[in-house]
Amino acid sequence: MPTPPRSPRPRNPDRRPARPARPAPRPPAPPRRRPRWVMRTVTALSVVVLASAGIGHAVLSGLDDDIARVDPFRDMKNRPRAGHGMNILLVGTDGRDNIGKAEREKYRLGGAPCHCTDTIMIVHISEDRDRASVVSLPRDSYALTPPHTDRVSGQQHKGHPLKLNAAYAEGGPQLTVRTVEKMTRVKIDHYLEVDFASFMKTVDVVGGVEICTDQRLKDSHSGLDLAPGRHTLKGGEALQYVRARYVDGGSDLSRMRRQQHFLAALVERATSSGILLNPMRFRDVTRAVLGSVRADEGFGTGELLDLGRAMRNFSPSSSEFTTVPVVTPGHVVKGIGSTLKWDAEKSEHIFDALRRDEPLSTRPSAGAALRVPVDPKQIRVQVENGTRTAGLGRRVDAALAATGFATTKAPVNAARQDHGRTVVAYDPRWDRSARSLAAALPGSELRAVKGQGPTLKVIAGTDFEKVRKVRPEDPGQGELGVVRGDEVNCG
């Protein structure tokens, strides 16, 4: 986003958008015969989450017949070693055959579908069924395929470079699975493929999903137009939300963050609305999802029930989300174009955690830092003591600095010492920074002061108790970008 004109002035962030591996014995398995990613893949994950009802075959009988089957594992050899837990590869297509003309027009779903994938995700369900780790693999990732047969022309191909989403066009689900396994060394246990219709049906059948935003979200391409605040989105609106690419300059990273927010909100809705305790509602939700899903032969009612019996305590804090870390974007490959090359070391950390059945992040759940729109390191703060309590200014300054804010480390006394409430004074041009700072000072008052400039001012009042830990919405590659479901929902 544009920044206020300046040169020597500080940059304004408001103006821009291990242990040894355990042995992994597995019992013999029976033969196993494309936001834009979340709008097609979140529904498949919801099948796994909603399975925590733990209901019986009598209610779910016949659901296997609703699933279209594919055989992504046929004749696969030299696969990675199986780990603990379950790895599900979710891919999304832009299929819209089951969406009526009126809805297509209303929600900007025109144009011919390409029947291709955009972004692919690995969903890892821990062996104890207490955690779901979701790793997004960007569609433009630089990939090397194994040797394969083109599914359209029948031509034999040697391994060659391409963008990851092109693997589906060349070799369908099988080449997609083989390429992902080659890149990650994570064995895929199940394959799920979903489309627009499945997403919309699922959101509608759970009664809508609540999302929140602190700024207007408008995208002329998808038709999204949301005012700041809380909104309960039904199927079509939710599809617009997760498809939007032009809200903030076409940033795919921003779109992925919104998609993570939506997926976390869907988990919250599923686990708190009583759906999981109502067998008939659970059946209706599952049927709505499965009617537009393609899956391997090994994924069916039995797997849903097994997960259901184990996942009774699943909650938003049990889910974690990340995108594969990449090095500087724009790795140009002749004949392919600009690709995203993964950061080998950081990516391996993520995939090793999946193989070991360990959390992607080691941060504890208790006392989790609050997500804020601007990184505290980019917010300059001058602290003033607005009370007669000696040393309060130094204490507030130190606490803010410890949380990451760029304080002056030279607190002063305010013009008045009768402040009962802590005040955050700010120039309106730095309003996002002000909201981020106020989030760290519970109960503080935001006070706009035109012309104050980029340095924010905290006037400590007698109500000051502590500084709450905060962290930016996009924590950066240094922390692998991992967020938990309870950190990105409205709660």
Image (spheres, rainbow, N blue to C red):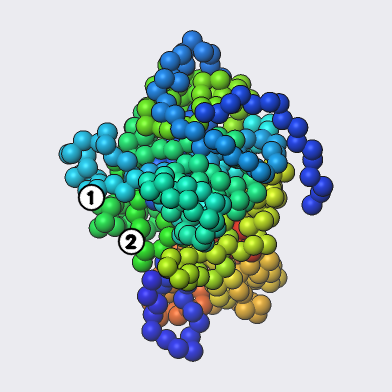
Question: Which badge, 2 or 1, comes first in the chain's sequence?
Answer: 1
Q: Nearer the viewer, residue 330 or 398?
A: 330
Q: Which label lies toward us, 2 or 1? A: 1
Circles 2 and 1: CB distance less than 8 Å?
Answer: no
Circle 1 residue: 111
Circle 2 residue: 246
Residue placed furthest toward the front: 155
Regarding residue 491, the answer to whether it shows in the image is no
Q: What residue appears at the point 61 percent right and 51 percent down from the top-left corner?
A: 182
Regarding residue 408, the answer to whether it shows in the image is yes
Q: What residue appears at the point 53 percent right and 41 percent down from the top-left corner?
A: 89
Find the distance from the CA under tag 2 to the CA under tag 1: 18 Å
Q: What residue appears at the point 34 percent right and 45 percent down from the top-left corner?
A: 115
> Few, some or many C-alpha atoms within 10 Å of disc 2 (few <14, some 14-19, many ≥20)?
some
Q: Amino acid at mark 2?
A: Tyr
Q: Amino acid at mark 1?
A: Gly
Q: Nearer the viewer, residue 326 or 362?
A: 326
Relative to 31, 13 lies left or right: left
Q: Nearer the viewer, residue 144 or 104?
A: 144
> Few, some or many C-alpha atoms within 10 Å of disc 1 (few <14, some 14-19, many ≥20)?
few
| Quadrant, the N terminus | bottom left
Q: Is label 2 in a helix, a strand or a loop?
A: loop
The quadrant in which residue 231 appears is top left
Q: Is label 1 in a helix, a strand or a loop?
A: loop
Q: Residue 240 at what x, y percent from top left?
A: 31, 48
Q: As displayed, is residue 75 above or below residue 478?
A: above
